[in-house]
């Protein structure tokens, strides 16, 4: 009898504790105390169908910002990608205009740690940082820990076709500064020796901590120079790289003690006059590579092969060609640009988008296997954690959204005033066991429907809000969420969406 009474008391206490736990509001880290969602009478408009990628595809990397000429650098486990901001030209001339590049004075910043969900960090406004430039294209970036203990980022860019500039920062997203107040290399630089367009820089740092810079556009115009210890001066004579059929798009890598120079060759067919045994002549406007142990000796450079055909040869539309080879988390990736997304966004003006596919590199022989461009792109290499605060501008695919700079970074804006709902997709979120709540930091009057692992039927939860200031709003899922799922957010027109987070309790 006594044992039965004790058991009953324990059972009652357990029930009371469970009820108390269930009634506890969820804990979020979205800024301020989270407020329960309440209906505010928002009807969701028709969902926008304008899209340049399927959510299951990884290319292009970002589906609503035109950008090209990729480069990247790893920092604290994330990969930061930069490119020419074609979108600035698109904004200047409109969907019916042409991408003739003259309006581009900024660079795009993205980052990822899973290779499918990319965070948009906004633009580097190079024209504001460097008032002397004509344009800013084709960046190349490296980083190095300096004597002050900080990681310094050195980003080199094309000042139109006239030269090469450099900006620096101690964070991969800036703020950026102009250390020179003028070009690092231009037509007045001694020793160019016939290089009329000293642009399209490529940079690497070798095992000795020495920086090297390649550049040059046009026939017989590939050049390389050793950088000074400050990374913003030249510390050698400028040497030729004897790159066959050279056109543009220099890049440098340093692999297993070997300097690897990649470049875009011209549009010719290259059928006649080829005398390099063991390799075929490169197709027109493809990417080729050369290697050496002694970069300032022109005779030491060995032509190895082409490794990437023009995207048009691979079903992704013809365009100029510019690549960047990056090792990240034990794998090599080739970043490039393609024109195929533009027509899906209603333009044919030559506006490019960044893409990536996995590359195979034999580090022992420093051999780059031929890379195939696909819309499917690369596989996700880690799951996204939905229980941490995730920025709304971290997405895999989207439609009808834009961005604005806020006091603490970028913020996502939905719709364009036409009443149509926007949507975003985040891929591969690992909910583990039984996520119960969803919260978001928002502003405005609107509604967000959240679908977990599906795109049809009833949403798994809905947030409604009417707030003039940034507010954390939450609601309970209709049923507990578990496992790895893609997330789809449908947003009513005019919503400011900053961040989101799931919670178990």
Image: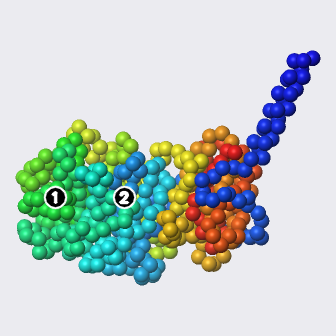
List the single residue furthest toward the right.
1
Give the answer, above or below, for where 432 lies relative to 357.
above
- Which quadrant holds residue 349? bottom left
Judge by depth and name the residue closer to the eye, 168 or 258: 168
- Measuring from the top left, give residue 239's x and y in whole percent: 9, 60
Tag shown at residue 171: 2
Of the 4 image quadrants, the one containing the C terminus is top right
Give the answer, above or below, for where 99 lies relative to 18.
below
Judge by depth and name the residue closer to the eye, 99 or 191: 191
Q: Is residue 121 left or right of residue 225?
A: right
Q: Is residue 156 left or right of residue 347?
A: left
Judge by depth and name the residue closer to the eye, 256 or 290: 256
Residue at the (53%, 45%) spot, across then down: 383
Tag shown at residue 227: 1
- Disc 2 crowd, CA 10 A, few/some/many (<14, 14-19, 20+): some
Residue 266 in view of the camera: no
């Amino acid at each position: 009898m006594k044992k039965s009474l004790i058991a009953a008391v324990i059972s009652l206490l357990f029930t009371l504790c469970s009820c108390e736990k269930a009634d506890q509001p969820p804990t979020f880290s979205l800024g301020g105390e989270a407020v329960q969602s309440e209906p505010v009478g928002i009807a969701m408009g028709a969902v926008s169908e304008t899209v340049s990628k399927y959510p299951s595809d990884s290319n292009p990397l970002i589906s609503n910002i035109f950008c090209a000429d990729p480069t990247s650098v790893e920092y604290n486990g994330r990969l930061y990608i930069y490119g020419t901001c074609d979108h600035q030209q698109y904004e200047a001339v409109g969907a019916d205009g042409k991408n003739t590049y003259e309006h581009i004075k900024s660079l795009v910043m993205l980052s990822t740690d899973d290779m499918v969900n990319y965070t948009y960090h906004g633009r580097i406004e190079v024209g504001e940082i460097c008032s002397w430039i004509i344009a800013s294209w084709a960046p190349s970036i490296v980083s190095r820990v300096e004597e002050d203990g900080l990681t310094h980022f050195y980003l080199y860019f094309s000042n139109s076709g006239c030269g090469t500039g450099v900006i620096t920062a101690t964070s991969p997203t800036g703020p950026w500064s102009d250390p020179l107040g003028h070009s690092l290399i231009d037509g007045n630089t001694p020793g160019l020796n016939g290089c009329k367009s000293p642009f399209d820089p490529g940079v690497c740092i070798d095992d000795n901590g020495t920086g090297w810079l390649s550049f040059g556009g046009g026939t017989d115009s590939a050049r390389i120079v050793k950088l000074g210890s400050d990374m913003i001066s030249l510390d050698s004579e400028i040497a030729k790289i004897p790159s066959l059929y050279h056109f543009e798009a220099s890049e440098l890598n340093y692999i297993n003690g070997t300097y690897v120079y990649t470049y875009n060759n011209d549009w010719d067919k290259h059928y006649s006059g080829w005398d390099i045994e063991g390799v075929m002549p490169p197709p027109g406007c493809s990417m080729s590579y050369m290697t050496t142990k002694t970069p300032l000796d022109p005779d030491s450079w060995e032509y190895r092969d082409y490794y990437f055909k023009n995207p048009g040869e691979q079903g992704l539309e013809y365009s100029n060609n510019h690549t960047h080879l990056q090792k990240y988390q034990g794998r090599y990736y080739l970043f490039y640009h393609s024109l195929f997304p533009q027509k899906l966004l209603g333009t044919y003006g030559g506006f490019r988008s960044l893409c990536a596919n996995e590359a195979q590199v034999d580090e022992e022989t420093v051999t780059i296997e031929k890379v195939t461009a696909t819309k499917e792109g690369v596989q996700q290499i880690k799951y996204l954690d939905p229980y941490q605060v995730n920025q709304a501008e971290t997405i895999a695919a989207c439609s009808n959204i834009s961005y604005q700079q806020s006091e603490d970074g970028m913020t996502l804006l939905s719709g364009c005033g036409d009443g149509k709902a926007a949507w975003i997709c985040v891929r591969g979120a690992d909910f583990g066991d039984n996520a119960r709540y969803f919260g978001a930091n928002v502003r405005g009057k609107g509604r967000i429907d959240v679908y977990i692992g599906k795109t049809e039927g009833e949403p798994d939860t809905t947030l409604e809000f009417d707030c003039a200031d940034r507010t954390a709003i939450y609601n309970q899922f209709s049923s507990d969420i578990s496992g790895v799922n893609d997330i789809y957010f449908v947003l009513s027109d005019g919503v400011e969406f900053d961040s989101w987070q799931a919670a178990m309790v």
